[in-house]
Image (cartoon, grey):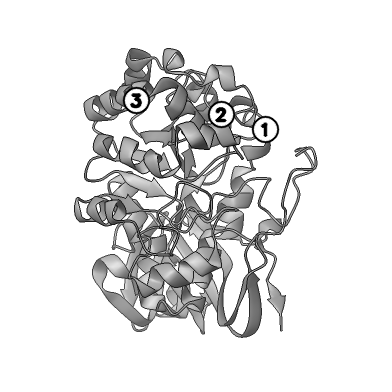
């Protein structure tokens, strides 16, 4: 006799922010879709049953700041499955490694080849992130082809979802507003958001800071941003971020948020725990939890990447790690779950079918998390630390109903104390 369900996830705490659902439920999947969420479903009606008691069942996590154009983008290009389904993340947004010129290769060798749902915010420059941005002559206003980029958006609407811009002092000093003007033209015509990196990318000589102070970066780029655009790296300790020297949030940042501009964590290597403390005291926190995983900030080395000895390799960035970080500083679980699910679906992907929700009939993109208790030491790259007594650790995920174990080497646990 035919079964009603392919799979039942039984007895987990199901949390779906879009439907204000939070409670112990059974969840059923059939033909890659969510077909039932009930207090009790008959296990005999399923081909397979997975016991998820004492675990969290949430919409598939979304990483809106991924670097997964492997091999092409050098140290920035991690394997998409490592960062994605093997880390409990069902949807990835590649940030800035792909250009209009390299998008066809990205679609063929990442989007179509990997198990994750993969999108991209395009780089404006023709070279994209080739070689990990190690060819600075390729990143000039003259290499931004407005018409070619607009055609890329038109031809690939399911993949290309926005534009990335790096608010970088040396470039703004040399070229002024020329690059961001072109990017603004593209995003306006394509009707997509712009994602803006903030914080010094590379250590710059004193003469650059003298001619174009880091504080001037925000003043320069903010007039080109609109409601729906996103700032990256909420708690960056690099020059040109969101805080004044005394730890107060800059007034221009407050203005940006009030105008409808969003803030992404962009965990990466520059997240500073002291700024997290100070930011949260001022109610400054991100809406989304971009991980920004690359070879410079992971605890696990990619054997195919040579960082030339420059890698830090002592971070543990990740979407779940972002939730753990904010929870360690007092943000409630119920507030961080939307940051990993429904918020990035709305802000980055315009709420596509099956993304960031457990709606009945939606694609079965689901993350299951172990909800651990104990004592762990979280550390930033300046060796500041915080002790947490609760840790969310990906157990597995379903992407379109297919099971993927969370066995990525990137999921190493923090130090237990």
At a point 60% along the width and 25% down the height, the residue shown is 130
Q: Quadrant of the C terminus?
A: bottom right
Q: Are marks 2 and 1 in contact (CB under 8 Å)?
A: yes
- Residue 210 lies left or right of residue 215; in this view the side is right
69 and 284: which one is in front? 284
Q: Residues within 10 Å of mark 1 (few under 14, many from 20)?
A: many
Q: Quadrant of the N terminus?
A: bottom left
186 and 36: which one is in front? 186
Q: Earlier in the sequence, mark 1 or mark 3?
A: 1
Q: Earlier in the sequence, mark 2 or mark 3?
A: 2
Comparing labels 1 and 3, the label whose residue is closer to the camera: 3
**Would residue 159 be visible to someone looking at this image?**
no
Any mark on residue 15, and which? none
Q: Residues within 10 Å of mark 2 (few under 14, many from 20)?
A: many
Residue 314 coordinates in the image, percent (x, y): 71, 59
Say which residue label 2 marks: 129
Residue 60 coordinates in the image, percent (x, y): 44, 59
Taking 381 as reference, is 228 above or below it? above
**Would residue 335 be visible to someone looking at this image?**
yes
> Whole-Å distance between the Cαs marked 2 and 1?
8 Å
At a point 60% along the width and 38% down the height, the residue shown is 202
List the single residue furthest toward the left: 259
Say which residue label 1 marks: 74
- Residue 310 lies left or right of residue 93; in this view the side is right
Say which residue label 3 marks: 177
Residue 322 coordinates in the image, percent (x, y): 51, 64
> Whole-Å distance between the Cαs marked 2 and 3?
21 Å
């Amino acid at each position: 006799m035919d079964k009603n369900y392919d799979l039942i996830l039984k007895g987990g705490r199901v949390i779906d922010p879009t439907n204000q659902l939070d409670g112990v439920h059974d969840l059923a999947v059939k033909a890659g879709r969510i077909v039932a969420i009930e207090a009790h479903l008959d296990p005999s009606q399923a081909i397979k049953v997975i016991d998820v008691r004492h675990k969290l069942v949430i919409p598939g996590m979304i990483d809106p700041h991924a670097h997964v154009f492997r091999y092409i983008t050098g140290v920035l290009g991690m394997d998409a499955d490592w960062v994605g389904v093997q880390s409990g993340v069902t949807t990835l947004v590649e940030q800035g490694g792909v250009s209009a010129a390299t998008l066809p290769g990205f679609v063929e060798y990442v989007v179509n080849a990997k198990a994750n749902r993969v999108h991209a915010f395009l780089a404006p420059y023709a070279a994209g992130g080739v070689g990990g941005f190690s060819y600075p002559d390729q990143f000039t206003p003259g290499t931004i082809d407005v018409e070619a980029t607009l055609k890329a958006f038109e031809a690939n609407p399911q993949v290309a979802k926005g534009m990335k811009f790096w608010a970088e002092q040396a470039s703004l000093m040399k070229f002024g507003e020329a690059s961001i003007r072109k990017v603004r033209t593209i995003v306006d015509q394509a009707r997509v958001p712009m994602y803006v990196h903030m914080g010094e990318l590379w250590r710059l000589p004193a003469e650059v800071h003298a001619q174009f102070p880091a504080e001037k970066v925000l003043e320069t780029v903010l007039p080109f941003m609109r409601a729906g655009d996103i700032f990256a790296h909420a708690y960056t300790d690099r020059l040109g971020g969101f805080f004044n020297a005394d730890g107060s949030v800059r007034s221009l940042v407050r203005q940006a948020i009030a105008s409808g501009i969003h803030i992404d964590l962009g965990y990466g290597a520059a997240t500073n725990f002291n700024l997290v403390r100070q930011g949260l005291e001022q109610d400054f926190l991100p809406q989304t939890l971009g991980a920004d995983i690359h070879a410079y900030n992971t605890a696990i080395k990619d054997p195919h990447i040579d960082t030339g000895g420059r890698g830090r390799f002592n971070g543990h960035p990740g979407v779940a790690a972002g939730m753990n970080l904010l929870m360690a500083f007092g943000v409630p679980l119920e507030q961080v779950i939307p940051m990993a699910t429904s918020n990035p679906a709305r802000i980055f992907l315009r709420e596509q079918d099956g993304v960031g929700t457990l709606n009945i009939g939606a694609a079965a993109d689901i993350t299951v998390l172990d909800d651990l208790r104990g004592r762990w030491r979280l550390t930033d790259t300046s060796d500041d630390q915080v002790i947490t007594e609760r840790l969310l650790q990906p157990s597995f995920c379903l992407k379109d109903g297919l099971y993927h174990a969370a066995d990525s080497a990137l999921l190493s646990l923090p130090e237990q104390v």
